[in-house]
Image (cartoon, rainbow, N blue to C red):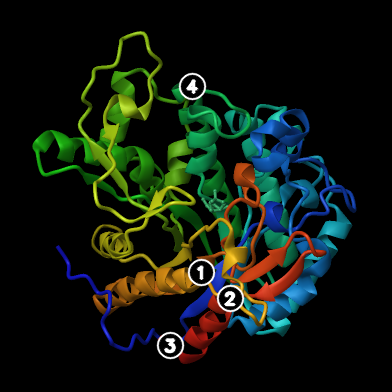
Amino acid sequence: MLNNLQGTKETYRFPKNFWWGSAASGPQTEGASQCDGRKPSIWDYWFSVEPGCFYNEVGPEHTSDFYHRYKQDIKLMKETGHNSFRTSIQWSRLIPDGIGQVNQKAVDFYNNVIDELIANDIEPFLNLYHFDMPMCMQEKGGWESREVIEAYVKFAENCFQLFGDRVKYWFTFNEPIVPVEAGYLYDLHYPRVVDFKRGAQVAHHTIVAHAKAVEVFKKLNIDGKIGIILNLTPSYPRCLDAVDVKAAHIADLFFNRSFLDPVTKGEYPKELIDILRERELLPNVEAEDLSVIKNNPIDILGVNYYQPRRVKAKESPVSEDEAFMPEHLFDPYIMPGRKINPHRGWEICEEVIYDIMIDLRDHYENIPFFISENGMGVEGEEKFRNDEGYIEDDYRIEFIQEHLKWVHKGIGEGANCLGYHLWTFMDNWSWTNAYKNRYGLVEVDLNNNLKRTIKKSGKWYKEVSQNNGF
Ligand code: BGP
């Protein structure tokens, strides 16, 4: 077990040109969902038919209004020490019908955002898909349909052509496993299908879409790097009994290697294919798919890290006629005595970020990567407001600092980590949780015209960035 680094009085300096910034997404920040030609995504549609699925029935149009306030917000990024910032382009804004006509108003908006970031010395990182399928494309089958792959690739090509002269860091997808798990396995997101085989098809099509987008990027000779952002949840067994270790290994195959291997090594893990084949759960794969995946490895990886996955061997057998789920092969496990964020229910385990870094160093050819999300969602932060009117979120400072210590250690041991992006810059609307948990360096006051106020963590983050460490 590694030493606990907490409480040390050391100084932590990061490599020259380290990226300090944060991540956000178009659908969670822009708002203006019906402005200037944008059409609904699955989120707008789902909210219109099932508002009760959203915390306090607050839907996706209730964002921090980045669409109209981006100038002010970019100024605040500067004031909180950002040298880089990731957001996503909304497909349903850029190409409202999913295929065909590009919306000039959207082009103007994204151009303005990119130019404003660059004018403020903030490197723009652009992601092309953050859970936000245009509704018209979902009607064609969403990621289950080959037609949607082609439409996505065209959308990606448009983005590269329109913004590739200024944007140097591109990402095809954010956490592509989330739409699979939440949309096709666990009934958490639209389209609320519970069917492993369809989920496997969605996963495969997403990887094909990703690889084809990388191929187009390379063909266009864009002067930049392209990658994908994966949420990695390292899996740890309850104990070192062989059955538990095997359970953790399988969980890792399903939730991490299923995407990480094809995008970096160009192929699915053989063991995963064997497990799916045995159960007749393999997706349909067309002749060209495997070669396009093989020939288009990423240049750079984004790693979103929130929590580990703890598992134990399956204790009670599953009946034959129950539909297959990954949990047929292992049970989730709550490890006693671990720190949990009570608001989000996620375990906080800082050293796991180091384990990811060492795994990438040793098993993925030391691929260049950065921490593209890491953060702490907290409910009821108003109670930490001080006399000067800003929120003293010391817990967030501690959270970031403790993770950064492990990032620092990983870099010291040769991991190729280029930066750290917090989730997120400003409190934002969060999928089904809406505004329940706040993650920002900057507060958004929902009761006062979305007034922005930098929290203590935002002031602290600026110092970290200026000193390139703490
Ligand atoms: C990641 C997503 C983000 C964001 C974050 C926090 O998985 O990429 O979009 O939502 O998690 O999670 P939540 O908002 O559900 O608390």
Q: Check disc 1 and report the residue beneath it.
A: 421
Q: Check disc 2 and report the residue beneath it.
A: 84
Between disc 4 and disc 3, whose residue precedes? 3
Q: With 362 as the anchor, is 228 left or right in this view? A: right
Between disc 1 and disc 3, whose residue precedes? 3
Label 3 amino acid? Lys
Task: Kindly identify the residue that appears in the image at 50 percent across and 55 percent down.
Answer: 228
Q: With 230 as the anchor, is 255 left or right in this view? A: left
Task: Kindly identify the residue that appears in the image at 51 percent across and 69 percent down.
Answer: 421
Label 4 amino acid? Asp
Q: How far apart are marks 2 and 1 (CA)?
A: 8 Å
Task: Kindly identify the residue that appears in the image at 56 percent across and 58 percent down.
Answer: 171
**Number of other residues with Cα within 10 Å of mark 4, as a class: few under 14, some 14 to 19, many 20 or more:** some
> To which quarter of the image does residue 293 belong?
top left
Residue 213 seen in the figure: yes
Q: Which of marks 2 and 1 is in front?
A: 1
Which residue is more in the foreground, 55 or 250? 55
Between disc 2 and disc 3, whose residue precedes? 3
Task: Kindly identify the residue that appears in the image at 43 percent across and 38 percent down.
Answer: 290
Q: Check disc 3 and report the residue beneath it.
A: 16
Which residue is more in the foreground, 141 or 231? 231
> To which quarter of the image does residue 16 belong?
bottom left
Residue 425 x, y percent position in the rendering: 61, 68
Q: Which mark is residue 195?
A: 4
Secondary structure, mark 4, is loop
Residue 104 x, y percent position in the rendering: 87, 58
Label 1 amino acid? His
Q: Does the residue labelled 1 lie within 8 Å of ligand 1?
A: no
The quadrant in which the C terminus is found is: bottom left
